[in-house]
Structure formats: structure tokens, C-alpha cells
């Protein structure tokens, strides 16, 4: 339909999802009203909300103890809401520092209680995932960022611990099989692998709540949202609808197991090209490479802009690295077709052949 969209977020969505959503903007399933006009308390919307929450539960195969909430505020609000609900002065929280997003989460947590940064890859400019560290048994929770969107690193192994694990999965949720029940709280901004900006997914075990005595504003209180079935206030109706369509699409693809295979293929193809093309070089430790965000540079910095311009001419969009890292970043979220990755790889080869 359009350009090869490698944006890091907001990012590519399946074509058929966009098509259905566009129809619903005019008339939601023949009801004579737009999805933008219906009441969030209507039966129609309740069905949409329940399908979305149930799909999340099914796809992640979550234990009964989990509640699925669809909230406002983005992952950045969760940086605050997590410690607001779980952390107080009596016991510290443990955090892994693996990049910009982790650092922001750490900064917010410190407003609510003691924070121990138990590992950090800052000294290596966040080009890897820390391996040797321990999590004090007396921690309220351990927080990690499963995929570091800006640096292109990803946790492939998780530490054994009895401390509840809280994970920011904004950029790799639904992309690979994991034992999601290893975690006690999972959150993700929707705009990378789930839907448009404006909705935040939170899956939280009820058993970790209510352990601190702080009084919370209602909107910040997970318990309030749970008691109200994720309908305490007007939820992000349209973003939830699109997320529901994306999850339907994911199920049609065969679920997480099937999409993981394709994601593996896409990232293998691109990393192989980066490793074999003399013009380019990957920037992170091989064993920690992300399958969602592939970061690399061009060996001759004088060619960087030329390559970007060349890609633009080929309708390849969104591959410029984050403003703090430079270089290139190619995001391969679930909706990114293999064809587009093949096209990118061919373009890298063609560019190299002209320069070689
Ligand atoms: C994009 C991103 C965020 C920020 O999400 P917002 O919804 O913009 O607040 C946080 N964490 C990770 C890992 C991200 O990729």
C-alpha cells in the first residue's frame, strides 16, 4: 500500500487492521454510529473491551491471579504508577538499568522509596545486557525493560528470583514466547506492537497489591481500576478498538508462537546482512541483540546521510537511529512483513555495490 515503515513507535500496523478501523470511524459494525461516538458504557464497547482483555489473557496464557487493565498515560505513566502502588520507605525496589527507558523508570521510582540499581550496562553505553548480579531477597520488586528500543538490546534470559518481577515490555510484548507467569506485573505502551498511541496495557497479579499503606489518587490506584473492570473513567476507546483488531489479527497468524518464527526470520536476515556487508557494523553484543529493534552504523560516517537519502528514494522510512545514539535503527515489529525486510537487505547490498 505504501512505504516500508520501519518506525520505532508509533509504528506499523497490519493493513487489514487499518482498513477495518477506518470503516469503524464512519460506522461501527453497521450500528449507525462511529466508534468515536459511542458510549464507553454501551454494550458494543463493553464487548470490545472484554474481547481485548480476554485476548491479552489468552495470548499471554496468564494465570487466574492476573488482572488485565487498559489505561491511559503511556508506559511513562507506569514508571510512576508502579512505585506509587508497590514501593514505600520500608523496603527498597531493585532496578536493572539497561538504557534510557530504564533510567527514566528509576528516576520516577526514587520519588516513592529507596531504589537499588542492581545492575547497569551504562559503562558499555548500553550495548549489552548485564549478566552477573544479584537481586536482594528483601526487595519489593525487581524491574526490568525486556527490550531496549533505543539501543537494540533484549533480555533473552531472565534471572531466577523469588522477588516479584515487573517488566516494561513496551517494545516486545506479543513478539516472542515467554513464560509470562514469571512476571508479576507487565506493562506496555500500545504504540509499538499492539495498536496506536493512547492506550497502555497493564497485566498485574492481584496478590502483589495492597502491601503498602499509602493512600492513592483513584486514577493511580490499580485496585480502583480492577474493581471497575478497567472502566473507572472513559478509557481510550478508539485505541482499545484498534488493539482488539490487532490481537484478532495476531490470533489469525497463529498467535505468538507463529509470529515469533517470522520475527526470528526477519531479524536473522537483517543481522546476517549487517555482519556480511563490509559497509555496515552492528552496535550491540551479539548475544543480546534485539529481534525487534536492530541497531547498526555505517563504517564511514561520511556515507550516513547518503544512505538515508538513498533509502528515502526507495520508500524505506523510519530507519534513522534515535537522536541520542545516531546510526540506524530498523524496527521489526509483528506487523512488519518479511518482504519489506528482504527489500531493505537488497537495498543495502545495492548501495554497497555502488560504493565498493
Ligand atoms: C516507547 C517506550 C516507552 C515510552 O512509552 P510512552 O508510551 O511514550 O510513555 C517506555 N519504555 C519502552 C521500552 C519504550 O519502548
Image (cartoon, rainbow, N blue to C red):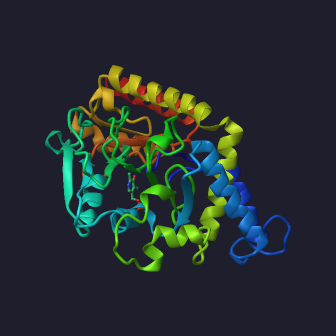
Q: Residue furthest left?
A: 123
Residue 345 at x, y percent in the picture = 46, 29
| 197 to 356, vertically: above or below | below
Is residue 189 at least partly visible in the picture? no
Q: Which residue sits at x=68%, y=45%?
A: 249
Residue 120 at x, y percent in the picture = 20, 44
Q: Which residue sits at x=56%, y=46%?
A: 63
Q: Is residue 101 left or right of residue 119?
A: right
| 108 to 312, vertically: above or below | below
Q: Is residue 7 left or right of residue 284?
A: right
| 349 to 134, vertically: above or below | above
Q: Which residue sits at x=64%, y=45%?
A: 58
Residue 290 at x, y percent in the picture = 38, 36
Residue 190 at x, y percent in the picture = 52, 57
Considering depth in this image, is 87 or 260 the residue closer to the camera? 87
Q: Which residue sits at x=70%, y=48%?
A: 248
Amino acid at each position: 500500500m505504501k512505504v516500508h515503515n520501519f518506525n520505532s513507535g508509533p509504528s506499523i500496523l497490519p493493513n487489514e487492521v487499518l482498513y477495518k478501523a477506518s470503516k469503524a470511524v464512519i460506522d461501527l459494525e453497521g450500528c449507525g454510529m462511529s466508534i468515536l461516538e459511542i458510549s464507553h458504557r454501551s454494550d458494543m464497547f463493553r464487548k470490545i473491551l472484554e474481547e481485548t482483555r480476554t485476548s491479552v489473557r489468552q495470548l499471554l496464557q496468564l494465570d487466574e491471579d492476573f488482572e488485565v487493565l487498559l489505561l491511559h498515560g503511556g508506559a511513562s505513566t507506569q514508571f510512576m504508577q508502579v512505585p506509587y502502588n508497590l514501593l514505600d520507605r520500608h523496603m527498597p525496589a531493585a532496578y536493572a538499568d539497561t538504557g534510557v527507558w530504564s533510567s527514566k523508570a528509576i528516576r520516577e521510582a526514587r520519588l516513592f522509596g529507596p531504589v537499588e540499581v542492581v545492575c547497569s550496562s551504562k559503562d558499555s553505553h548500553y550495548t549489552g545486557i548485564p549478566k552477573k548480579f544479584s537481586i536482594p531477597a528483601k526487595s519489593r520488586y525487581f524491574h526490568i525493560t525486556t527490550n531496549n528500543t533505543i539501543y537494540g538490546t533484549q533480555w533473552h534470559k531472565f534471572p531466577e528470583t523469588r522477588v516479584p518481577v515487573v517488566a516494561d515490555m513496551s517494545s516486545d510484548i506479543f513478539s516472542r514466547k515467554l513464560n509470562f507467569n514469571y512476571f508479576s506485573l507487565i506493562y506496555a505502551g500500545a504504540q509499538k506492537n499492539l495498536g496506536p498511541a493512547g492506550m497502555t496495557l497493564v497485566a498485574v497479579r492481584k496478590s502483589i497489591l495492597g502491601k503498602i499503606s499509602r493512600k492513592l489518587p483513584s486514577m493511580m490506584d490499580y485496585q480502583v481500576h480492577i474493581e471497575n473492570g478497567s472502566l473507572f473513567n472513559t478509557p481510550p476507546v478508539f485505541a482499545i478498538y484498534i488493539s482488539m483488531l490487532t490481537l484478532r489479527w495476531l490470533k489469525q497468524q497463529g498467535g505468538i508462537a507463529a509470529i515469533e518464527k517470522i520475527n526470528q526470520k526477519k531479524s536473522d536476515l537483517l543481522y546476517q546482512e549487517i555482519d556480511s556487508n563490509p559497509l555496515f557494523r552492528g552496535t550491540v553484543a551479539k548475544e543480546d541483540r534485539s529481534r525487534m529493534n536492530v541497531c547498526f552504523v555505517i563504517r564511514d560516517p561520511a556515507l550516513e546521510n547518503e544512505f538515508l537519502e538513498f533509502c528515502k528514494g526507495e520508500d524505506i522510512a523510519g530507519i534513522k537511529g534515535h537522536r541520542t545514539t545516531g546510526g540506524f535503527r530498523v524496527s521489526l515489529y509483528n506487523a512488519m512483513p518479511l518482504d519489506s525486510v528482504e527489500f531493505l537487505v537488497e537495498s543495502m547490498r545495492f548501495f554497497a555495490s555502488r560504493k565498493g
